[in-house]
Image (cartoon, grey):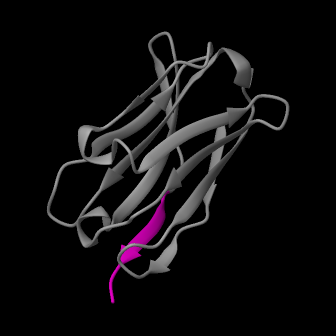
Amino acid sequence: QVQLVESGGGLVQPGGSLRLSCAASGIIFSIYTMGWYRQAPGKQRELVATITSGGSTRVIDSGKGRFSISRDNAKKLTYLQMNSLKPEDTAVYYCNAAYGSGSSWGQGTQVTVSS
């Protein structure tokens, strides 16, 4: 079965950086569109960034210039590099793997941006 395991979250000061990682297993990783979503307390889950099997990327408007997504097909890893973090980036970040009508989620990793 599909398993997605996120890591790299934590507490960081405003202006700091974090790199989230998502390790995938149980899928033919290279054909999946991989994504990062986040959910802040009291808010709906929102898309942060996606990367297709061909390497095309998309980043949420509030993250442009600060966030980047990448993937390593050989290692079945997806990364979210987050720079210049702001308190409003505080949320649980979830990894997603999508192919056709199927979609799988990781358990999430907490990112807290606070001084």
- Where, quadrant-wise, is the C terminus in this rendering? bottom left
The image shows residue 26 at horizontal and vertical percentages of: 75, 32
Residue drawn at the location 55% of the way across and 19% of the way down: 52
- Residue at 66% across, 14% down: 31
Magenta segment's dominant SS is strand
Question: Which quarter of the picture shows residue 72?
Answer: top right
Is 81 displayed left or right of 48 in the figure?
A: right
Tell whether position 13 is magenta.
no
Identify whether 75 is placed above or below 67: above
Residue 23 position within the rendered picture, expressed as x and y whole percent measured from the top left = 70, 46
| Magenta stretch in the rendered image | 108-115
- Quadrant location of residue 13? bottom left
User: Relative to residue 69, is residue 38 depicted above or below?
Assistant: below
Between 74 and 27, which is closer to the camera in this rendering? Answer: 74
Name the residue furthest front.
Answer: 65
Q: In this view, does 19 lie to the left or right of 45?
A: right
Q: Is residue 52 visible?
A: yes
